[in-house]
Amino acid sequence: MKTFTKVLATALTAAIGFSLVGCAANSSEEDHIYRTLDEIQESGVINIGVFSDKYPFGYVDENGSYQGYDVYYANRIAEDLGVEVNFVSTEAASRIEYLETGRVDVVLANFTVTAEREEVVDFANPYMNVALGIVSREDNVITSLDNWNPDDSIIVISGTTAETYLIENYPDIPLQKFDSYATAKEAFENGTSAAWANDNTEVIAFAIENEGYVVGIPSLGSQDTIAAAVTSGNESLLNWLNDELVTLGTEDFFHADYEATLIDVYGADYEDELVVEGGVI
Amino acid sequence: MNWEFIHKYWPLYEKAAILTVRIGLLGILAAALIGVIAAFIRYRKIPVLNKIVAFYIEISRNTPLLVQLFFIYYGLPKVGIKLDAEVCGIVGLAFLGGSYMAESIRSGLESVDKIQHESAISLGLSNRQAFTYVIFPQAISTSIPGIIANVIFLLKETSVFSAISVMDLMFTAKDLIGLYYRTTESLFMLVVFYLMILLPVCILGSIVERRVRYAGFGT
């Protein structure tokens, strides 16, 4: 009994200690964890969080440099700000954390705008449309999520809108969760699960690139948008990003972006469906 | 701190903790078994096997668990061996832990004075009896601190299982942060649960350590 009390006491002390550390960090961060537009320009470097494994939106090519639709936009932001760009590779689930701790100034990691996320970060105006999609194997095409076989699971990536959507709308479907695009893809190819749910852009790209896969459900849930996100309260940077979108809209920048990065994968058919110019849908 | 959130997701952590402990326990048991066999082979210097075991120990100790798990979970299906994620976790833990256990036990075996074996034989014990009743008990008493350290080390290593989609404690916390953005609460519960698992192991370990001291020779 004495030992047990000792264990409990130690556990509590340690837990309280840890949480105090958490609190202290939070309160000091609250006023000014982010860098304002001026501070970024002064430092000469902007930190932008992108994916390193989400082809063709944010990925690392064979030469080790970042490429893709998001990256193309990120490079332009840095150019127009007159600063160098420092890419920070993020995972889906850590995008919010990166902003909340000020490790990046902007997240451009194919970030879908949702009401829950808007509570914790600030989104700029959108630059792309998106919905969810589900890809499955040719010999077992899934076209509906009703009457789901409980022995089968769906692969999702932790921290994505696909995960949230399925938890809320299909709580009985078993989910196989992965923490990165690379591992989810690998597992799907190994036949771990019957289907993979993700942004429809991503699953369409996957089905085009890999033989034997079909996007049985090309559009699921609501039509959403993808936008740049900044740390909550970073108004100077947010306003600049929105003004920038208007400027870029006049030159059809995102059409050019699409043609430079996405056309090889999707062809021209999706161009007007995907691209958002000037921050206005 | 939002206690409602903690209350709501506490059961999720309980489930994850049970999974973590289950994988940890089975993995560690398997590791101990591998450890005893490997240590015995090394101790007796059984030809051929000795070389194989030495090779295994070097491979296993000098590669990170994460790499081993990737190999087992993502690599093996390419050659037709498909294991459940949980089984992969157990196999990975056993593969990594086996070598650590083997080295701990071997150091115990080698610390037993040669004269012990000779005396046992001269008293009429067979080789096997000498090992089971004389050498092994003494060796284990020396090895126990190392073995307990390994157990704690292996339990903590389970935190990399998120890479192969096992919903262990670490992944549950990461997933909740990604879903609901409640970092402080999620991490708080993570720490509490790891402590609840590891502190009793620690204390049990030190009790066992004290208990087995008697077996030592000349101390």
Image: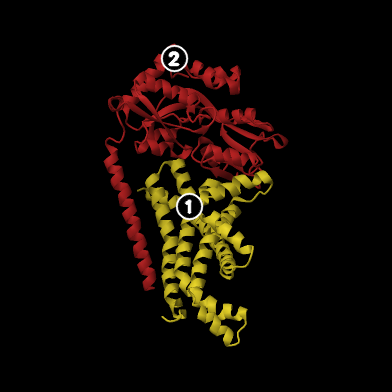
Chain colours: A red, B yellow
Q: Mark 2: give few (<14), some (14-19) or many (20+) Cα within 10 Å.
A: some
**Label 2 is found on which chain of the structure?**
A
Rendered position, B143 above or below A68: below
Q: Is residue A276 left or right of residue B79?
A: left
User: Is there any visible trace of residue B157 in the rendered image?
Assistant: yes
Amino acid found under the numbered disc labelled 1:
Ser
Residue pictured at 46% horizontal, 59% vertical:
B153
Rendered position, A197 above or below B6: above
Relative image position of residue A262 (x, y in whole percent): 55, 22
User: Is there any visible trace of residue A169 in the rendered image?
Assistant: no
Q: Nearer the viewer, residue B14 or A266?
A: A266
Discs 2/1, front: 1
Q: Which residue is mark 2?
A: A249
Distance CA(mark 2)–CA(mark 1): 46 Å
- Which quadrant is the N terminus of chain A positioned in? bottom left
Q: Mark 1: give few (<14), some (14-19) or many (20+) Cα within 10 Å.
A: some
Amino acid found under the numbered disc labelled 2:
Gly
Q: Residue furthest right?
A: A139
Relative image position of residue A109 (x, y in whole percent): 46, 31
Quadrant hosting residue A76: top left
Q: Which secondary structure lies at badge 2? A: helix
Q: Nearer the viewer, residue A168 or A122?
A: A122
Rendered position, B62 above or below B44: above
**Label 1 is found on which chain of the structure?**
B
Q: Nearer the viewer, residue A197 or B50?
A: B50
Q: Which residue is mark 1?
A: B159
Q: Is residue A235 left or right of residue B39?
A: left
Q: Mark 2 touching mark 1, by CB under 8 A? A: no
Q: Which secondary structure lies at badge 1? A: helix
Quadrant hosting residue A11: bottom left
